[in-house]
Image (spheres, rainbow, N blue to C red):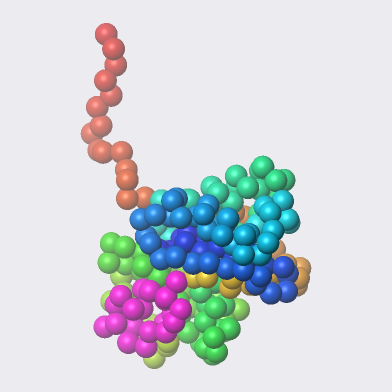
Amino acid sequence: MDTATPAVTVALHDGSAVVAATSQVDARRHGELLLPAVDRVLSEAGLELDAVTGLVVGVGPGPYTGLRVGLVTAAAFASALSLPVYGVCTLDGLAYAAGLAGLQGPFAVATDARRKEVYWARYEDFRTRTGDPAVDRPADIAEQLAGLPVVGAGAVLYPEAFPDAREPEHVSAGALAALAAERLAAGQELLPPQPLYLRRPDAQVPKNYKVVTPK
């Protein structure tokens, strides 16, 4: 599952292929849509939740509230069912999906970070990220990404900085699960299921906050 972008996306993977998947784009309803999406995927596969043997969750980067929905839900399922839970960078999932669709490297991935910024990373190919994810204004990175295809909604939002925008716009849980399965089969260590924050949350305690104590 992944809720780091406006897409609420869930998939069931059997280790070899995606069994069932669903995605719905709605940036304001992550908490409302995620659990019904889990039920829908399990129903389509004809399975119950106890058939799940492991969980993969996108760790972002992404806006604070939406990202937390997926991570907290994955943690709750893992605790209740005693399941392992693995984190995967959401940008890596987008890159992997682009590669499965035929995009050759090098290229970049950019998602909407709000505040007129994008979360982005550069890839040598659809499995290999070069450097850590970052958050920047599109104009500030346009020159270093010049000539590269850029995958994701961030590219679509800022065509003046990223003229060669490519699909998919949002991550899919199916691609995220397939990438995780591939890495696990190769003995690679996945990320802990912790949020990948690249800046402070929008909601902060006001400065000069006055504490009121009873007399």
Quadrant in the rendering for residue 7: bottom left
Q: Residue at x 32, y 45 (%)?
A: 203
Tell me which segment is drawn in magenta.
150-170
Q: Is residue 192 visible?
A: yes
Q: Nearer the viewer, residue 75 or 114?
A: 75
Count of picture labels: 0
Q: x, y percentage for residue 56?
A: 62, 60
In the picture, measured across the screen, residue 72 lies left or right of residue 139, that is right
Q: Quadrant of the N terminus?
A: bottom right
Quick check: 186 left or right of 6?
right
Instruction: Answer whether residue 124 is visible to the viewer in this image.
Output: no
**Residue at image x 34%, y 83%?**
162
Report the side of 81 relative to 62 (left or right).
right
Q: Is residue 13 above or below residue 159?
A: above
Q: Position of residue 98 (x, y in %)?
A: 52, 82
Estimate the x, y position of residue 135 in percent, counting from the top left.
Answer: 39, 66
Residue 6 is inside the magenta segment: no
Q: Is residue 14 above or below residue 164?
A: above
Q: Which of these two is toward me, 87 or 45? A: 45
Q: Residue at x 62, y 64 (%)?
A: 44
Asked whether 60 or 25 is in front, the reply is: 25
Q: Quadrant of residue 47?
A: bottom right
Q: Is residue 108 above or below residue 185?
A: below
